[in-house]
Image (cartoon, rainbow, N blue to C red):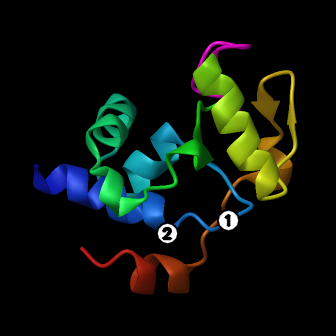
Amino acid sequence: MTDNYHKIWQTVLAVPAGKVASYGQVADLAGLPGRARLVGKSLGMAPTSMQLPWYRILRSNGQLAFAKGSESAERQKGLLQTEGVVVMNNRVRLKEFQWQPDLGEILFKLDF
């Protein structure tokens, strides 16, 4: 896998339980501004052994990544709800649940 994928995966692993991030936010924090689509692609390429919390990554408007009512959307919704994230109408209120890492988190958790 590419170095960019590893940067993205490390960033996604840093998103704490009970919080979400957007694809664009992950790209920015991984040092890949404007590469939100690459974040989505890399999530699909992650080894299952990595246990990446892919479900914490949402669209920029807080919407789940999958079509409402689809099996994948229901799985994502269920995983988020087990962490206390409220999902209503296939959407998460980013003002309430978006991860806002402080400088310490960025410096010490994102080691690339």
For the point 65% across and 25% down, the residue is 73
The secondary structure making up most of the magenta span is loop
Position of residue 112 measured from the top left corner of the image (x, y, whole percent): 24, 73
Q: How many marks?
A: 2
Q: Which residues are magenta?
A: 61-70
The circle drawn on residue 17 is 1
Q: Secondary structure at mark 1?
A: loop
Residue 95 placement, left or right of 32: right
Which of label 1 and label 2 is nearer to you? 1
Residue 107 placement, left or right of 89: left
For the point 13% across and 56% down, the residue is 3
For the point 59% across and 30% down, the residue is 59
For the point 43% across and 56% down, the residue is 52
Q: Quick check: can you spot residue 81?
A: yes
Position of residue 102 measured from the top left corner of the image (x, y, whole percent): 60, 77
Residue ID for mark 2: 14
In the image, 77 versus 91, the foreground residue is 77
Q: Up-down: is 66 above or below 3?
A: above
Position of residue 55 measured from the top left corner of the image (x, y, whole percent): 58, 43
Check disc 1: other Cα within 10 Å, few if <14, some if 14-19, many if 20+. Answer: some
Q: Up-down: is 78 above or below 60?
A: below
- Asked if the stretch drawn in magenta spans residue 69, the answer is yes
In the image, 85 versus 23, the foreground residue is 85
Check disc 2: other Cα within 10 Å, few if <14, some if 14-19, many if 20+. Answer: some
Residue 88 placement, left or right of 80: right
In the image, 26 versus 42, the foreground residue is 42
Q: Amino acid at mark 1?
A: Ala
Which residue is at the far left?
A: 2
Q: Residues at badges 1 and 2 in contact (C-beta under 8 Å)?
A: no
Q: Amino acid at mark 2?
A: Ala
